[in-house]
Amino acid sequence: MIDNEHMVPVNICSSMTPISQEIAHLLLDIGAVVLRPDQPFTWASGIQSPIYCDNRLLMSHPEARRKVREAFIQLFKEKAPDCELVAGVATGAIPHAAWVSERLNKPMVYIRDAAKEHGKQNLVEGKVAAGAKAVVIEDLVSTGGSSVAAVEALRNAGAKVEHCFAIFSYGFPEALKKFAAIQCALTPLTDFTTLLQIAKESRIIKADQESLLKKFAADPWHWQ
């Protein structure tokens, strides 16, 4: 049962809703998202990117992280009211899963990117009851590979997983196809399209830079 103490009213998120715009503003304001189309970043995957997202910075901003938590709570109420288990993907989503599970008074587990090489060699840490209805929380979804792997790991541990909630998603076609293939719904609090609109309205980027960023979203592997 959801504890209503200290609840902050929010609207459910889809692209360009009030809450998606608020979260986009929030990520830009605290520097969790940096747009640099003229000096691309290099991702671990090798992709040259005009944008970098580090949602771990939310941990250092109590008010911002509370807004993210309450937006997640609203998603649970609207899309997964029968959730029995909250799962965070290591490492960035672990604190968010902890804050959300505490508010929902639900059990929590977290999913490693690889099984431990010692001890019990766990991939999923925490107790997973057989058949438990679980929701995976991600801090960021880019190409979708690690997020989909987390969903499958939790399913292999015995949970039923139909939803993955994320703070931010680039909306890459590749990621959307991967989630569709495993029949898991991906719902971000905000997304690349919303972020670009907010950045343009806030004059963080110019029209020519917006065009470059849109081309990146359409084909990140060949953008540069």
Image: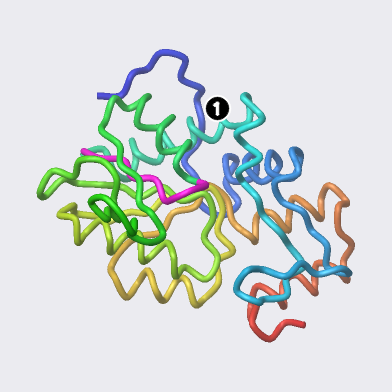
Name the secondary structure under disc 1.
Answer: helix
Question: Residue pushed farthest bottom?
Answer: 222
Q: Quadrant of residue 207?
A: bottom right
Q: Nearer the viewer, residue 62 or 177?
A: 62
Q: Position of residue 115 (x, y in %)?
A: 33, 59
Circle 1 residue: 66
> Which residue sits at x=19%, y=54%?
160
Q: Nearer the viewer, residue 75 or 147?
A: 147
Q: Is residue 173 left or right of residue 132?
A: right
Q: Which residues are magenta?
A: 83-92
Q: Quadrant of the C terminus?
A: bottom right
Q: How is the image coloured?
A: rainbow
Asked if 5 appears above or below 8 in the picture, the reply is: above
**Amino acid of disc 1:** Arg
Q: Position of residue 203 (x, y in %)?
A: 88, 51
Q: Nearer the viewer, residue 173 or 194?
A: 173
Q: Are there few (<14), some (14-19), or many (20+) residues within 10 Å of tag 1? A: some
> Which residue sits at x=47%, y=36%?
95
